[in-house]
Image (cartoon, coloured by chain):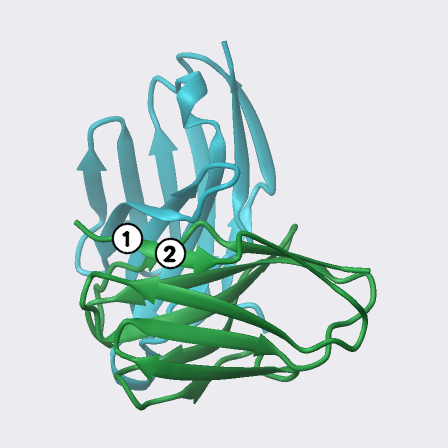
Amino acid sequence: GGIITQTPKFLIGQEGQKLTLKCQQNFNHDTMYWYRQDSGKGLRLIYYSITENDLQKGDLSEGYDASREKKSSFSLTVTSAQKNEMAVFLCASSMDWGVQNTLYFGAGTRLSVL
Amino acid sequence: QQQVRQSPQSLTVWEGETAILNCSYENSAFDYFPWYQQFPGEGPALLISILSVSDKKEDGRFTIFFNKREKKLSLHIADSQPGDSATYFCAAGGRGGNYKPTFGKGTSLVVHP
């Protein structure tokens, strides 16, 4: 078995601040994802990385940057936090990029912006 | 454009009843449909999945019924238990350029004892 570790678990930021969320996986998976979860809106894909050194924009990439530092880690940066923003950011990984791959999720980073 | 739709948004059933969660999709290229279960404070986890070549998939108390012609599927939870109270996400993926996993907005299920 493996695990996805997201840090921090809770993140409180100020409006306009640049915030970085980190994700580590020990599955040895090729593909990693960042999703944003808002109440009533489901999961929306922000960025994904098919293999190490790859980076692809998802449906919600504006206002975010991402970095795949190595195979096991994938970071997400909120470039300028929006006032009163509240969301959960979920990191996931899958064996590779293809049909029928199970996504394994971390427990999330809960963001609040004052 | 929302490619995967779920209904109802929330559902309450009594222990022992069958809960039925619905999902529909737009893209005919989708051919893999996993359902994920999420408990509060946790990330989603795969519950059960189906390929479009099948019309039914069972795993214990959980059954997916799939109608390719109508682009609809449903998750039936038989003999619902309070421990099944969670949010359920229907997702879809296809081959090649359509692979990108797409999630619905989820159904929040509450099972009363």
Q: Which chain is home to disc 1?
A: A
* B4 on left or right of B10: left
Q: Residue at x 83, y 67 (%)?
A: A83
Q: Amino acid at mark 2?
A: Thr
Up the image or down, A16 lies above or below A109; here it is: below
Q: Which mark is residue B97?
A: none
The three-letter code of the residue at mark 1 reads: Ile
Q: Colour of chain A?
A: green
The vertical placement of A31 against B79, above or below, is below
Residue for badge 2: A5
> Does residue B28 appear in this view?
no
Where disc 2 sits, the SS reads strand
Which chain's colour is cyan? B
Could you say which quadrant of the image residue B9 lies in? top right
Which residue shows up at 25% across the image and 50% down it?
B49
In the rendered image, which quarter is residue B8 located in?
top right
Q: Are marks 2 and 1 in contact (CB under 8 Å)?
A: yes
Q: Residue at x 21, y 53 (%)?
A: A2
Quickly name the residue at label 1: A3
Can you say whether B11 is above or below B9 in the image? above
Residue at 22% x, 70% y is A99
Q: CA distance from mark 2 to mark 1?
A: 6 Å
A109 sits left or right of B16 in the view:
right
